[in-house]
Amino acid sequence: MVLTHTTNHTYSHPFPTVTLAFFLRYYSPQLNPFSSHVLSTDTISSHVDPDTGRLHTTRIHLKRSRMPAAVVKLLPTSVTGGGGDKSSYVLENSVVDIREGWMKTESQNLNFTGILSIVEQQHYSVSPPDATASSAERDSVLGTSPLASTVARPISPNTFVTTTFSYRSSLGNKKQDHAALASTDASDEPGPRRIGGWISGWGANRIQRSIESIASNKTDDAVNKSRDGMRMVLERLRSNGVVAVLMELRRREGKSVFDQS
């Protein structure tokens, strides 16, 4: 079973500025106080497709996260490793088409996937979701190529984003039981046997649905904090200008904004 949660939002900023804010949102707590839980960000790859002109980027973020208290209470310590702050890697893939005015992103956790896998997909566009769909359908019918249009689009003052979270728990599946234990503390009892007996008593489907529901219920809070962080970065860019913000970040950190550590 997979639970999904979809929301729509509008930023009152042009698309180029929003895409820049997306890539800067985890750069520094001074720029975005809501990013203090992000311990590090590294770019794995980044390139522009010569045929489409689209920017493809893969990054990995190390985040400090706290497993929901309800999940900690629901599962044995041998599965959760106990409560408290934990670190988790998040893989982020993005594609930006500046000519057509859209960006698609997908992020997913790489740790604790045996307990819960979370995938966040976002679609940023210069057009509202319904208009974007109509345009895509029209281009498909007409066979329009990505670089076929040579007419410059007027810059829209707004950027629209659709965010979809997907939650899937595989706890109770034999392979995933071992994966869940791989990154947790060892216990005195044999892990898989203990988990197997506990799951048999509760029922795997019931446990999976409960975990997915708990995570889904916290989505609104996570989305609101993410948007608040984006708004702060966007306002800094609007008030001070892109160059001034980048120069200030470079001065504070003592390195280029585009350097990788």
Image: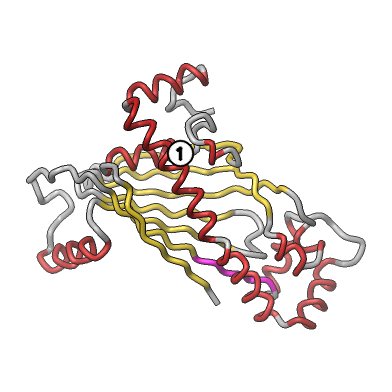
Residue 179, given in percent of the width and then of the height, sits at: 69, 62
Query: Which residue in the rendered view is the most extreme toward the left?
Result: 151
Give me the residue at 54% from left, 36% from top. Answer: 33
Q: Is residue 217 above or below residue 16?
A: below
Quadrant where the image shows the C terminus: top right
Residue at screen point 44% across, 26% down: 257
Which is more toward the observer, 78 or 236? 236
Q: Residue at x 67, y 68 (%)?
A: 176
From the viewer's perspective, tell me whether residue 53 is left or right of residue 138.
right
Could you tell whether 95 is left or right of 119 in the image?
left
Nearer-the-camera pick, 150 or 154: 154
The way the protein has been coloured in the rendering is secondary structure
Please rate how many residues cluster around mark 1, counting C-alpha atoms within 10 Å: few if below 14, some from 14 to 19, many from 20. many
Residue type (three-letter) at the residue carrying disc 1 = Arg
Q: Which type of secondary structure does the marked residue at label 1 adopt? A: loop
Examine the rendered structure and indicate whether residue 248 appears above or below residue 6: above
Residue at 22% x, 44% y is 157
Q: Quick check: 215 above or below 12?
A: below
The percent position of residue 34, horizontal first and vertical second, equals 54, 41
Q: Quadrant of residue 133?
A: bottom left
The quarter of the picture where the N terminus appears is bottom right
In this image, 133 relative to 198: left or right? Answer: left
Rendered location of residue 26, percent (x, y):
50, 38
Specify the quadrant of the image occupied by residue 29: top right
Image location (x, y in percent) of residue 138:
14, 66
Q: Is residue 168 part of the magenta span, yes or no? A: yes
Q: Which residues are magenta?
A: 166-171
Number of marks in the rendered image: 1
Most extreme residue toward the right, as rendered?
A: 188
- Residue 176 falls inside the magenta stretch: no
Label 1 belongs to which residue?
25
